[in-house]
Image: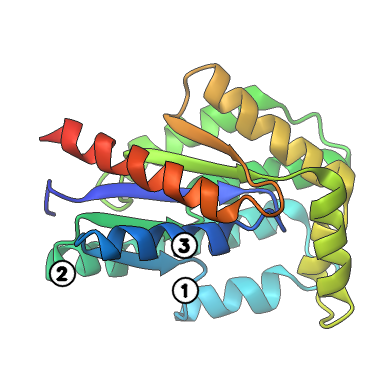
Amino acid sequence: MSKETLIVVWEGTDGSGKTSLMCAVKDLLSKKGYRVETYKTPGDTQTGRFALEYGNTQGVDGFTRMLLFAANTADDSKLIRMQIDNFRPHFEFIDRYYLCSIVYGIAILKTKHGKAANFEDVEKLLKLFENLGQDIFVRPDIYIIVDVEEEVRLRRAISKSSKAHSADLSYELDSRLQEEVRELYRLLIERGSIKAIWVNNTENKLKENAILLADKLVELRQSMS
């Protein structure tokens, strides 16, 4: 796999505008002459479709859901590696990856099932995944954790739920769950478990945030050389 590629994983709360921000940064970097490839999980693969269709079915417990989405990120990793090897991009943007499966899984177990899950469980699982999957997963160079004020996030989720109906949207509408997700990401950064940039994607600040992030990512990639 090419060492010239900066692996950037985009994560965050549902409705934070993560994917829109990622696309805006990609456009800016492309205009600067950089090659940027993207991959969104769950992908349109057998495990990706199953994770979405079955994992988001009402009645599926949080632990099963976490394992299904984690399995998909492992399975899709071969496609991400192929993308990097074939196109040798300057930046590989991954829209949600194995960390998301762990963080949301633990948050769901705690808020929906009353399990005594905490940050230490996330950290242990993350280390276990990365150790056992070191020849499978693509190791991120940097995480971009995107968040937004809960009032804005919830308004977007409600608008989305009025247009579609799925079990997954019930998670987006759950402010308690999203706060747990937010806190787990925050602790991972504060305790040095991941290298990350936290972005408060306030409304009407997408372009400004995209410019700042594009500059930071260029600097980070140059520091790899």
The N terminus sits in image quarter: bottom left
What residue is drawn where x is 47% and y is 62%? 24
Q: Is residue 33 above or below residue 119?
A: below
> Which type of secondary structure does the marked residue at label 1 adopt?
loop
Q: Nearer the viewer, residue 146 or 125?
A: 146
Q: Nearer the viewer, residue 42 or 224?
A: 224
Q: Amino acid at mark 3?
A: Ala
> Which type of secondary structure does the marked residue at label 3 adopt?
helix
Q: Quadrant of residue 58?
A: bottom right
**Res. 87 mark:** 2
Q: Quadrant of residue 149?
A: top right
What residue is drawn where x is 80% and y is 59%? 172
Q: Amino acid at mark 2?
A: Phe
Residue 216 percent across, percent down from the top left: 35, 38
Residue 142 percent across, percent down from the top left: 38, 38
Q: Which residue is mark 1?
A: 43
Left or right relative to 131: residue 34: left
Separation of disc 1 and disc 3 at Cα? Answer: 21 Å
What residue is drawn where x is 64% and y is 74%? 52
Q: Which residue is mark 3?
A: 24
Answer yes or no: is residue 140 visible. Answer: no
Of mark 2 and mark 3, the one earlier in the sequence is 3
Of mark 1 and mark 2, the one earlier in the sequence is 1
